[in-house]
Amino acid sequence: MRVRLSPEEPSLSRSQVVVRGLFERPVGPSRLPPDLRAEDRATQGALGRAWTAVELRGSRKEITTFHRSGPGPGRLVLIGLGAPGRYDAEVARRASAEVVRALAGRGARSVTFALESFLRADAVDEVAAVRAVVDGAGLGSYQFARFKTKAPDAPIEEAVVAVPRPSRAVRAAFREEADLVDVVRWTRDIANLPACDATPARLAREAQALGRSHRLRVRVFDERALARMGCGGILAVGGGSTHPPRMITLEYPGRGRSPPTIAVVGKGITFDSGGISIKPAASMSHMKFDKSGAVAVLGILRAARVLNVRPRVIGVMGCAENLPSGSAYRPGDVVRTYSGRTIEVLNTDAEGRVVLSDALAYAAKNYRPDALIDLATLTGAQSVALGDTIAGMVSTDDALAARLADASARSGEAIWRMPLTDYHRELVRAADFGDVRNSIEIPLAGMLTAAAFLETFTLERPWAHLDIAGVAYTTLSTRKYQPAYLNAGAVGFGVRLLARLLADWDVGAGR
């Protein structure tokens, strides 16, 4: 989808549809809001009659269409924004996505959003509103149809955000968000690829192509290089597959003198069968999304270049396919990792943390970053605790956690900080034959013991772990409960969040 900022009056747009937000009306009779009176005339009084009959309430997700006469768009769509006191940018983001999804296949190829109708002085200003509408329209229209022989419902091809006399700040926010939406859509395309296409080697080629197109330094470590480096974790997890593992690094140099270094590490399990500790067959097809953390790293590095952020950004992707075979690693194996520390393997389905043991230690040792952040579809316990719209965050650094929380609030990608205590650390260290064990014998605090395991390999750098197991993708069964800007399949979680963190790094937390 193309997005465009326009200074024109919405009612004179050349789009086929103009969209206005409508706040929930008070109970009982009330007058038509002044900003809708011109539209009432354009609909020959139909809007006013619907208002008088209380057919328009402005409730959340309420979508009402009117046909207009005269110049400008042929249709007017009113999208309910709910109670004014509960309105924020996330409501605007969801509402704009709901509109573009509802219009798909309805004969409209272009739509204009009247931005002034999505503002609320005490909650959402023009900058926040333009970001939210671009997010919602651009991401809500996304479809992954690469393997379909029959074209899906025609999506909206162009979204126009109408802002008479836009300020410099609004123009800058629009450009930045439009670029970022393009990055997220690209990220989703890669994350949605099936495991037969998205092997570790394919992800390496995607990284190399990104490096060439966006002037990033890229290195790919194959299985021979990993063996020389002592990356026993990645090699163990990938040992059962005919597609050998890869570790991939990307570097964006940053701007100015001595920029801070931020390292972002992603779990890239291109397919997770569970290995010898095999998963149940139900929903195993979703395990092609177990690469979502590593693919998000690709998106974050692309966003860093596109947005021209100041920090130097390092991306490290640990990529392997976890399959059972005669060469697969086994429960009871002891694995020596890049850091020199050993892992006692008790469950081969706890493979993500084993891969990340090498990737985290490599990033920490070789780049000594000012902040080390990992993204991983790591534990089912995350979605049990927080559901499928909020990622779990564990951090050893309060300042970094505050920055991430601020970026979360501004980007709309929700995270929630969870505790990490010596109780969780002791559960991981209680290994009989290694320094740490990759699974514990009691089914408690799974998200937090996994984080305690990862902490072992961060080499005491300021660190935050984002468990995105529940938020990385949607399914047909969960889709109806989630925001309309999350498509069926991979959603690219973490790209907007980390892009906002990087763009605002010099400002700090608490904005």
Image (spheres, grey):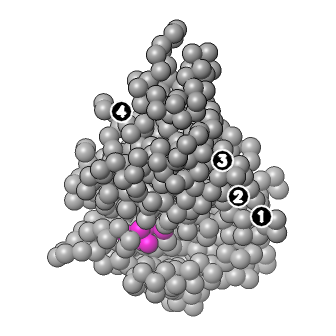
Name the residue tied to disc 4: 120
Q: Separation of disc 3 and disc 4 at Cα? A: 25 Å
Name the residue tied to disc 2: 154
Residue 372: which quarter of the image?
bottom left
Q: Earlier in the sequence, mark 4 or mark 2?
A: 4
- What residue lies at 79% left-to-right and 75% top-to-bottom? 325
Magenta stretch, residue numbers: 299-304
Name the residue tied to disc 1: 151
Q: Position of residue 75 (x, y in %)?
A: 60, 42
Name the residue type under label 4: Arg
Q: Earlier in the sequence, mark 3 or mark 4?
A: 3
Q: Measured along the vertical axis of the image, is residue 223 above or below residue 188?
A: below
At numbered mark 4, what does the secondary structure look like: helix, strand or loop? loop
Q: Would you call the spot at circle 2 few (<14 residues within 10 Å), some (14-19), or many (20 or more)? A: some
Q: Are marks 1 and 2 in contact (CB under 8 Å)?
A: yes
Q: Separation of disc 4 and disc 2 at Cα? A: 32 Å
Q: Earlier in the sequence, mark 1 or mark 4?
A: 4
Name the residue type under label 3: Leu
- What residue lies at 51% left-to-right and 9% top-to-bottom? 29
Name the residue type under label 1: Ala
Q: Earlier in the sequence, mark 2 or mark 3?
A: 3
Q: Separation of disc 2 and disc 3 at Cα? A: 9 Å
